[in-house]
């Protein structure tokens, strides 16, 4: 598994262009008018990881299977979306299904591409999107609270606990703040997540800049970065136009073209890394002659649960995990060399899997 990222923003900020480029498809129509994306387009991309190819080369693996990232391109929001303006209600529901929300913000000027608000102001665009999501959350919570109050009066403990969480969120939302700023105890996290609040999702600001600003950003993207830093949100600078141009190029041509623009890699790579960091995700590997495969888990995941990502039977019958650090695997020429050097460890149920671990799970069937 990778993670599921919803792409949101106002119309004509480059969302669909970016989606097409990232997924290297023409699934989303990129057009210069609002609501060109009506149903959410879904696209999967392989997560680029040079480590996986290196491992496969050493092990002479028959297949290379990277982890996957799912992008959901959700139609442009406008003021009033939470009340059904534009095509709002259809799309707000799709945001509930994603792990993180990427706010695509227009950070470029172009007289040929109209802005729905008639101005270029990425911070204001972000406020518009955020406000609509907050209003939708307010409406949802207020209606839910009224229902729960009846149960709470009947001494329903679960209802009482849920009301406390709802009130925590409502207090923030009524102050014009997103629910993700709430401090929630670990024991309440599951119940909090079940509220399915749009503004509780981690946010990644994607600054869509012009080609000349792709390497270093511009004044617009710098303002967004400052906002992201203040909020603890993610931020990445991308030129959707460049991404669209390099999407169809061969590897060598792509590298040469990016180098000519002062870029070391495609924006997709930076976007994925920013998303992984935002969601505290790490990758471990399974490697053998048949296949080399990457698996994504949340940082802090213990070995049995990491094994369960492969198959639930692996978690249920977990015995131990044969574990080799990535650097040791590579420097010692693979599993055999690592074993001979005493670098393969037998880890138990309490072992917290590290990013880059090469693992083989032993389990009872």
Image (cartoon, rainbow, N blue to C red):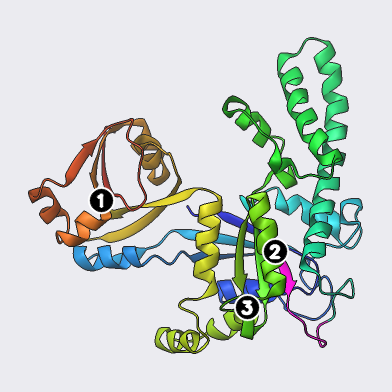
- For label 2, the crowd category at 10 Å Cα-Cα, with few meaning under 14, some 14 to 19 and many 20 or more, is many
Q: Residue furthest left?
A: 340
Q: Position of residue 276 (x, y in %)?
A: 51, 55
* Residue pointed to by mark 1: 325
> What residue sits 40% from the left and 37% below the top?
305
Residue at disc 2, secondary structure: helix
38 or 304, which lies in front? 304
> What residue sits 63% from the left and 78% below the top?
239
Q: CA distance from mark 1 to mark 3?
A: 36 Å
Q: CA distance from mark 3 to mark 2?
A: 15 Å
* Residue pointed to by mark 2: 224
Dot placed on the residue nearer the N-terminal end, 2 or 1: 2
- State the count of labels: 3
Asked if residue 299 lies left or right of residue 39, the reply is left
Above or below — where is 47 with respect to 193? below
Dot placed on the residue nearer the N-terminal end, 3 or 2: 2
32 or 118, which lies in front? 118
Q: Nearer the viewer, mark 3 or mark 2?
A: 2
Numbered mark located on residue 266 in the image: none
Q: Using the rendered view, name the quadrant where residue 228 is placed.
A: bottom right
> What residue sits 82% from the left and 34% below the top?
171
Stretch of the chain drawn in magenta: 103-113
- For label 3, the crowd category at 10 Å Cα-Cα, with few meaning under 14, some 14 to 19 and many 20 or more, is many
* Residue pointed to by mark 3: 239
Q: Position of residue 67 (x, y in %)?
A: 43, 58
């Amino acid at each position: 598994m990778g993670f599921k990222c919803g792409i949101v923003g106002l119309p004509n900020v480059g969302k669909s262009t970016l989606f097409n480029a990232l997924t290297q498809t023409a699934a989303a129509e990129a057009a210069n008018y609002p609501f060109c994306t009506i149903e959410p387009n879904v696209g999967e991309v392989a997560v680029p990881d040079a480590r996986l190819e290196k491992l496969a080369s050493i092990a002479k693996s028959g297949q290379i299977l990277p982890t996957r990232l799912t992008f959901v391109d959700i139609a442009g929001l406008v003021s009033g979306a939470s009340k059904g303006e534009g095509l709002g209600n259809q799309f707000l529901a799709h945001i509930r299904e994603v792990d993180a929300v990427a706010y695509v913000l227009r950070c470029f000027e172009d007289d040929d591409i109209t802005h729905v608000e008639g101005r270029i102001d990425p911070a204001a665009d972000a406020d518009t999107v955020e406000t609509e999501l907050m209003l939708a959350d307010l409406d949802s919570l207020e209606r839910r609270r009224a229902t729960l109050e009846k149960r709470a009066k009947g001494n329903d403990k679960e209802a009482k606990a849920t009301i406390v969480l709802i009130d925590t969120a409502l207090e923030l939302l009524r102050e014009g703040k997103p629910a993700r700023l709430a401090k929630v105890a670990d024991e309440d996290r599951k119940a909090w997540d079940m509220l399915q609040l749009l503004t509780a999702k981690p946010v990644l600001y994607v600054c869509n800049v012009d080609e000349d600003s792709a390497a270093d950003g511009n004044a617009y993207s710098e303002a967004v970065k400052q906002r992201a830093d203040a909020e603890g949100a993610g931020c990445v600078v991308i030129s959707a136009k460049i991404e669209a141009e390099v999407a169809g190029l061969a590897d060598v041509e792509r590298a040469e073209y990016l180098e000519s623009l002062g870029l070391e890699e495609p924006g997709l790579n930076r976007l994925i890394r920013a998303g992984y960091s935002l969601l505290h995700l790490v990758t471990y590997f399974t490697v053998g002659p048949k296949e080399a495969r990457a698996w994504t888990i949340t940082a802090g995941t213990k070995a049995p649960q990491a094994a369960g990502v492969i198959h639930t039977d692996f978690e249920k019958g977990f015995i131990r995990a044969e574990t080799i650090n990535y650097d040791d695997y590579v420097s010692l020429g693979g599993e055999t060399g690592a074993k001979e050097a005493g670098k393969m460890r037998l880890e138990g149920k309490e072992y917290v899997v590290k990013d880059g671990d090469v693992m083989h799970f032993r389990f009872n069937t």
